[in-house]
Amino acid sequence: MAKKPTGNKTYAQLSAELNEIMEWFEGEEVDLDEALAKYQQAAKLIEQMEKQLKTAANKIKKLNA
Amino acid sequence: MQDVILTPSDFVALLNQTLEFAYPAVSIEGELSNFRISKNRWVYFDLKDEQASVPFFGTVYMLPGPLQDGLMVRAVGSPRLHARFGFTLNLQSLVPVGEGALKKAAELLRAKLTAEGLFAPERKRFLPPIPERVGLVTAANSAAYADFVKILNERWSGVEVLLSDVYVQGDQAPGQIVEAIEMLNRLSNLPEVIVITRGGGSAEDLAAFNDERVVRAVAASRVPTLVAVGHEVDFSLAELAADVRASTPSNAAQLLVPDRAAELAHLDAKRQTLKRDLASAYDGAVMELVNRRDALVSQITNVLNAQSQQLQSLRRLIKLFDPQAALKRGYAIIRKGSKIVSSVDQVKIGDHLNLQVQDGTISAKALTKSPKLRAESSRL
């Protein structure tokens, strides 16, 4: 399995979550309390993604060794 | 030997035994002639030169693709004496040889597979934007492999590469590449993309990527494919059948994963966007509060204005009832002691009366009194 240093989420999953939050902000009615919570969640996701990008390594597994 | 009497069957068996021992397999290069396929399965042809011709027999599954008479090919086969049909070589593998023959064979295959729609643009699938599990079919000791891994590591992290080490040229290459693609497609946890790559080489080196079996395996893969054969000028048919083609193994890694530095910059841009979004959410909330306050102030002002108007009209009404206003018009208030006199019956002759007028009081004495007649009062 791909390296997942932050929780059980892969980079693609984190990226999808982040995009969802960004889309939410594009919506018509943005509640301030919710916006604050979502912003904090997004900041955390970005931090995790940066960490993955900077620390994770690629793994090579030979299948027909 | 001539003392031993053999039956024809014995002789065929003996000869085949000898042939199998002496020539388990031979490679013969020659010009293809009398090529024909029977019942879509059986293949018959001769390989010839100026002096000789030898017959071959095999199945279509051993062919690299469609062929035609006149092509130079190298066939591997086992010599046999068939009990009824005579001498033949049982085909094991066949490849076109020489640039001309390879090109011609590739043209024939391209025409056949194009007619089948194997290269149609509408068959192409997108590769996942950020793959995490990648199948890699290449030779593990090749420069192609090293280049691919180097660029992959430079660009991205967290990818699991499932390497299937295969020959990428030679007789065994097509079979191994096909097996690797099929094996990756059988995994319970499928890779998201299969990369098939090798470096550049001569037409003969690259022949496996124009082999019908390989091209069909690429096209049939459930998992999207990325094929990169290191040459720019001509596309191999495997590349044409792939969902995405890359020019070199390094280019394959570039197309496969995003660039780490670009992605980090992208993340930073997203962070700035989110900050702006939050600020605008805050501004929106403040604006809403201001609007609500203004609405409240305007409602209160309306209520106050209405009350004030009501007060004004009451004030005007009260003015009409003010006795002072009547005194100004010449009326007087008559009091006997502290009581106001409104009837002749309250007064006796000789009583002292006070008459209040606009600007003071007058003392008076009642001299006479004359009650108003009913008729008069009613007339009045």
Image (spheres, coloured by chain):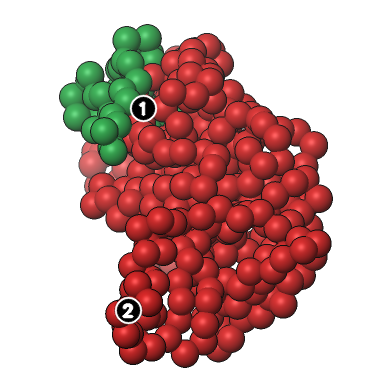
Picture coordinates of residue A41, whole percent (x, y):
30, 23
Q: Residue at x 61, y 73 (%)?
A: B55
Q: Amino acid at mark 1?
A: Val
Foreground of the two, B289 or B1? B1
Nearest-to-viewer mark from 1 and 2: 2
SS category of the residue bearing label 2: loop
Relative to residue B160, is residue B18 depicted above or below? below
**Mark drawn on residue B159:** 1
Q: Quadrant of residue B5?
A: bottom left
Left or right: B119, with B25 as reference point: right
Q: Chain of mark 1?
A: B
Tell me, yes or no, if residue B160 can be seen here: no
Foreground of the two, B232 or A51? B232
SS category of the residue bearing label 1: loop
Q: Earlier in the sequence, mark 1 or mark 2?
A: 2
How many other residues sit within 10 Å of disc 2, few (<14), some (14-19) or many (≥20)?
few
Picture coordinates of residue B152, whole percent (x, y):
47, 21
In this figure, which residue is indicated by the disc labeled 2?
A: B3
Q: Residue at x 37, y 77 (%)?
A: B2
Q: Residue at x 33, y 67 (%)?
A: B17
